[in-house]
Image (cartoon, rainbow, N blue to C red):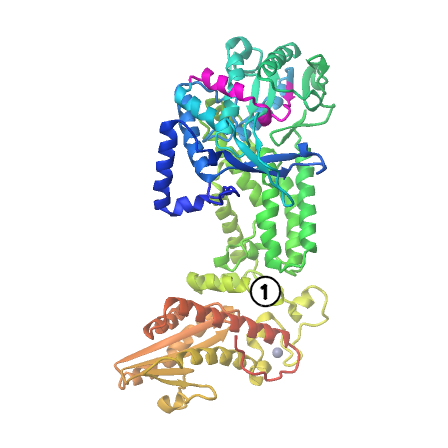
Amino acid sequence: MKPSGSPCPLDQISIICFKRCPYLRSYLTEIIHAAWSCGVVPSEWKKACTILIHKKAETANPANFRPITLESVPLKVFTSCLRNRTFQFLAENNYIEQNIQKGFTPKLSGTLEHTAQLAHIINKARVKQRSLIITLLDLKNAFGEVHHNLIYEVLEYHHIPDHIKNLVSTLYTDFQTSIITEQFNTSFITVGCGVLQGDCLSPLLFNMSFNTFIQHIKSEKYRQLGFWKSSENGTPLNPLHWFQFADDAAIVSGQEKENQMLLNRFTIWCQWAQMIIRVDKCSTFGIRKQLTKSIQYLPKLFINNCLVPRVELGKSFRYLGRYFDFNMSDEDHKSEVYDTLTNILNEIDDLPLHPKNKILLYSRYVLSKISWHFTVSDIGKTWVNDKLDSIASTYIRKWLELPISATLSNVLLPHNKFGLNIILPSTKFLQCQTVSRKALKSSPNEAINNLWKDTSNHKNVQYDKYKNTKDVLNTIRKHHEDKLQHHLISQGSFFSNIIKHSTLSFNSIWSSLQSKLPKNIFNFTIRYINNTLPTRKNLLKWGISPTSECSFCLNPESLLHVVAGCKTYLNEGRFTWRHDSVLNFIASILKSVNHCNLYADLPGYISPSVLTGDELRPDLLITLENKCIYILELTVGFESNLLTNATRKRQKYQDLINEQLKNYEKVKFVNLPISSLGVFSHPSLDFTEMLKDLKFDEQCRKYYVRKIINICIRSSYYIFCKRNKEWDNPQLMSY
Ligand SMILES: [Zn+2]
């Protein structure tokens, strides 16, 4: 059972209780044993609540709602055992037909198989100029109309042992449910007819009822009425005449006469089973040869003397969520996907949300809304690329305040590579197609495997090459990494510089901190990574600024220049302010360490020069009872200089290390090169090692790293905002 299954409001027992608590499970087993051996289901279990889920159209009509029954979880556990065992029994004895009826069958993607097969048939008929009739049937309230007498007869028909038959019978005798809404709930109503949606057994019972019909038309006599497919040498094989998925049925045949014969059989069965066909909701679609070409036409078919509505010429019909038309053009899918995407993105755009939440809505909600179209239809990849990616990209750029020229490659990467894990529609499309192709390839049904082979043509080969959805994602990401490293010199420079020198564990802390930043700073980090911040160099490139010169030093104002390069800013102490803000934080956490002496090159601390002299004065020293000394040197620099800074510092302090070895048993040099956007490079591991030695636990260490990242990002943001403005010597940043 799925852990997401809702508990029944009457007992409020969730399935999670049973999953997590073995003790409860043994009680449940005992109760189930007792119910099984005495053949009676406890009456408490036979009380449920029914909620109404709105399907479509106006809400005043109860028929527009789907009733879902929330049963008691213990009952569901019991009935799902019953269902699994019954299904196994039917399958092993070959009592149930699984090639025609594909609803609720385990290990099989029924809708995909049916829709792929139907599409293939239409394409074949059109190309080979064969005639084809497809009739879609609609039953009135199918689940609700299954009579209980029918259920018992159906169980009998399938040779279900008496004991189980009786159990099902007691289960459906006096089953009571109360319809609940937000405003009111009805008193308990005894379920006199129909199987309940939400009940574990009902899909199987429903299928078994239909199976009595399917078994009837399975015989050669009816089968040959179906649409024949020719093999290589022209001999007909695998006629298909009936598609069934739950209560969605489609009759397929080569001639009108044959379609009518099957339709008549079904009408008779419905009379026997007391099911009602809604003729006005049925439809029929026809293809035939006229002179030398294939055309769509309007077949004449009747149900109880009523003409079945015809699919208009050039129009499509829908079966199991896929649109079918004469040319299999997928135009309806395209327009629906396009509309859905634009409408929802537009709505998200209007919401007063942080950009990361807009992106979350896009990833979790929008993509799932269109993925069905991507899975069942044959929309081309180029169309998705041209039409959908451009819409999604426009909104993503807008939310992140990225200029039109900005690449999205950076944000498409995963979080641990400083991206936002965004998936474009075209990637989702590839994933969906991969899933659907894999489903056909690995189907237990041989005819479907053959269909996969038949359709492995040039167009589908591009989807067949991926192993799974993960593979698709990795390939796409690899492509973007490659683009950043080798093709986008300016926008890819952050990624190229950082990816070799950063450490994965720090990167994940970085991205989790990034997601918590307020909107303006969050977008600053994105544009920083893209190198599309409005520096004068960029503004000149975009034709907005007449010059690229820094107001103070007249050098070209690049991002490097603003956040770490300008000599004037350096002399004014802007970069030192950021450096000292970080150092001040580090010193403040080390203050709490017992039995040690702390020296820091900051106001309020003893200067390290007391021990080292002024010439080689490190940022921070910590000594432990004359045995061990830590020499900490912090650098906050631009991404492209991370490695150079690290090596330079180590060389610079080598003499000091050697000298201190005379005084202390252990001398540890802690090289801490951080980028101005708070990315820790490899040698920074020394820092966490030191914290570990000083007995800070893991949670603490992560928290400190997070804080340091925060200070770096925020102070660089401040420095950026102050470009070409007077420096106001602010207090050290503390966050
Ligand atoms: Zn300057």
Q: Nearer the viewer, residue 21 or 601?
A: 21
Q: Is residue 395 above or below residue 245?
A: below
Q: Give the SS element for disc 1.
A: helix
Q: Quadrant of residue 69?
A: top right
Check if residue 158 falls in the magenta segment: yes
- Residue 715 pos. (x, y %): 56, 75
Q: Is residue 415 above or below residue 293?
A: below
Residue 706 at least partly seen: yes
Q: Is mark 1 within 8 Å of ligand 1?
A: no
Residue 124 at least partly seen: no
Residue under label 1, please give it. Answer: 522
Please report the bounds of the magenta region as a residue range.
Answer: 134-159
Give the left or right position of residue 459, taking residue 444 as reference.
right
Check if residue 2 falls in the magenta segment: no
For badge 1, the amino acid type reads Phe
Give the left or right position of residue 193, taking residue 612 as reference.
right
- Residue 401 pos. (x, y %): 65, 61
Q: Nearer the viewer, residue 388 or 305?
A: 305
Q: Nearer the viewer, residue 9 or 119?
A: 9
Give the left or right position of residue 525, taking residue 450 as reference.
right
Q: Is residue 483 above or below residue 61?
A: below
